Image: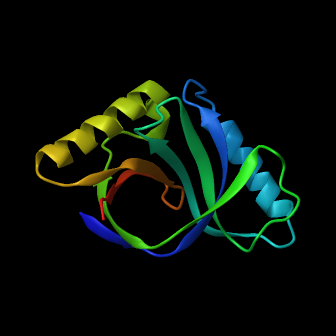
């Protein structure tokens, strides 16, 4: 399904792809956002960014409103322009997957879309929507412009 994404700002920490503990990093980001007087969460979603051209790292991020000052060295802020992406629902729950399994499912889903003719960028993401009783896991693939 194609979905439209708006402009967004993310607070993120870069992690080694062999670090399976993205939940710990996510909790640290949340604690920082809650304590920072000029920041608010934009949504109740954790977003993991992956890069096909740099497969050794990924970002653990949260969408924010505001601009932080005094960031710890390991945190960065990135602004993204809106656009369209291909959104694919993952049939597994986030807690059922290791990082290797998540990467494998995400890359396989992306390859299937590309073999069906979609032209996709090397950056893709996993969105975990915590608003649900059983959090949904989505793959988002950005279209090449």
Report the side of 129 relative to 69 (left or right). left
**In the image, residue 84 lies at what x, y percent?**
33, 69
Indicate whether 110 appears above or below 145: above
Which residue is painted at 80% across and 66% down in the image?
68
Q: Nearer the viewer, residue 105 or 75?
A: 75
Which residue is painted at 70% across and 37% down in the image?
24
Which residue is painted at 48% across and 59% down in the image?
132
Q: Where, by quadrant of the figure, is residue 63 drawn?
A: bottom right
Report the side of 3 relative to 102 (left or right). left
Q: Quadrant of the C terminus?
A: bottom left
* Chosen colour scheme: rainbow
Indicate whether 19 appears above or below 7: above
Which residue is painted at 40% across and 38% down in the image?
52
**In the image, residue 44 lies at what x, y percent?**
59, 62
Q: Nearer the viewer, residue 120 or 11?
A: 120
Q: Quadrant of the N terminus?
A: bottom left
Q: Where, by quadrant of the figure, is residue 69 drawn?
A: bottom right
Q: Where, by quadrant of the figure, is residue 23 drawn?
A: top right
Q: Nearer the viewer, residue 60 or 130?
A: 60
Report the side of 124 relative to 28 (left or right). left
Residue 101 appears in view? yes
**In the image, residue 33 lies at what x, y percent?**
77, 61
């Amino acid at each position: 399904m194609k979905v439209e994404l708006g402009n967004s700002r993310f607070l993120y920490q870069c992690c080694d792809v062999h670090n399976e503990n993205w939940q710990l990093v996510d909790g640290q980001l949340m604690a920082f956002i809650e304590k920072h007087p000029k920041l608010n969460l934009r949504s109740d979603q954790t977003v993991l960014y992956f890069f096909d051209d740099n497969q050794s790292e990924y970002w653990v991020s949260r969408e924010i409103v505001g601009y932080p000052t005094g960031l710890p060295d390991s945190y960065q802020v990135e602004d993204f322009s809106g656009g369209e992406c291909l959104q694919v629902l993952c049939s597994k729950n986030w807690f059922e997957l290791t990082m290797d399994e998540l990467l494998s499912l995400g890359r396989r889903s992306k390859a299937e879309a590309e073999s069906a003719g979609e032209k996709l960028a090397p950056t893709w993401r996993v969105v975990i929507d915590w608003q649900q009783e059983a959090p949904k896991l989505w793959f988002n693939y950005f279209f090449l412009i």
